[in-house]
Amino acid sequence: MSDLYARHRSVLPDWLALYYEEPLEITHGEGRHVWDVAGNRYLDFFGGILTTMTAHALPEVTKAVSEQAGRIVHSSTLYLNRPMVELAERVAKLSGIPDARVFFTTSGTEANDTALMLATTYRRSNTILAMRNSYHGRSFSAVGITGNRGWSPTSLSPLQTLYVHGGVRGRGPFAALSDDEFIAACVADLKDLLGHTRPPAALIAEPVQGVGGFTSPPDGLYAAFREVLHERGILWIADEVQTGWGRTGDHFWGWQAHGSSGPPDIVTFAKGIGNGSSIGGVVARAEIMNCLDANSISTFGGTQLTMAAGLANLTYLLEHDLQGNARRVGGLLIERLRAATAQDPGVREVRGRGLMIGVELTKPGTDRADPDRASAVLEAARAGGLLIGKGGGHDTSALRIAPPLSLTVAEAEEGAAILESALRSTQ
């Protein structure tokens, strides 16, 4: 056990998860690579949980943060803040929500917590619809709507949560149906559920479930849900903490794959916009955002330092069409991984879109999760110089692949080759 690991265990909570039998200390990074304390170099296919979205040590972001730190780091939301206003203007315009207002937080958890407060206040209801296998953060309210037992440490909650079918295409009672039949069955289930409860405040859903193993419904499911919800005045909250900013390649926001019935009422975001800086936020129609009848501030949300990072990162992302790169390179990577795993009896599915890819593992000859192999593949990939993630929910285990969106074709091929070798060595 390393000295740092021993110190970690003596002062930090036992439930604070660490990857690897010998946990890794990362000291620095550049581009799509990071280095550990021993000088080992790794190709990073997880980006600090989908957070280093553009690149490690991106000069444009580093310069913006350094220059802002030389002026002022923080003043709180009690004072006018030019970088916060400028980033809010850009996010509002990009959101697709009419008459949008933006509130900045420090994390995706806090963003979802704020969205829940807005929705329940606006609708005067504490009932929330959420998706099975979902994850929305680690606060008391966010845990209360999380549909993933592995990340839900308590059943206590300020909310009444009802879980809806549809977030997982390949499992569950509707898995054998065609896409159109799947959507119809999920809509029928939603209508039936609404007939048994008092009017809910909102449905919250990840367009692609992140912690749940990068699962998603057929395109159009949430558009069909929105028609049902809109008729009843129920809000739609799109949790874009992991899917926003072009990661899925085909769209800038994940909800746009379900946009035929209009945009969500509320969008939450975080992670990639800061490229490692602590930024989260909520976008909502003005009438919803302004429904609170008490004062509120954010001490650290929207601080000048993180807003400078967000502005520089967003500018780089748009000017270099990283969404298009995610679509092109991600498409190649998915096909490469499908070819590499076609003969592996323990790989149930390679799924995803853009640079958000899941490889679901099962025990050969069964449909049961294989979490032991998932951990073994992580270890073998690390030994080969590749960092990936893992996830999954009820009876699932998946490898999670989410590199920075500036990934090159050569790096995609290099990472795929390492992962293929890791999978072969663990069969």
Image: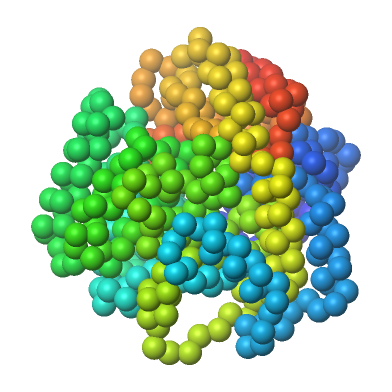
Residue 107 x/y as whole percent: 58, 64
With 70 as the anchor, is 73 left or right in this view? left
Name above or below for residue 348 compared with residue 113. Answer: above
Observer able to see residue 415: no
Please give left or right for residue 134 compared with residue 378 in the image.
left
Camera-side residue: 328 or 110?
A: 328
Q: Residue 75, percent across and down?
A: 71, 83
In the rendered picture of this protein, how many numbered marks are placed on residues? 0
Q: Going 39% across and 55% down the picture, which residue do you hit? A: 263
Q: In this view, does 11 lie to the left or right of 398?
A: right
Q: Which of 112 and 23 is in front in this view?
A: 112
The x and y percentages for residue 296 are 50, 85
| The quarter of the displayed image where residue 23 is located | top right
Residue shown at 39%/88% (left/top)?
Answer: 293
Quadrant (top left/top right/bottom left/bottom right) for the C terminus: top right
Q: Which residue is drawn at 16% across and 57% down?
A: 194
- Relative to 272, residue 251 above or below: above
The picture places residue 406, in percent across and down from the top left corner, at: 71, 39
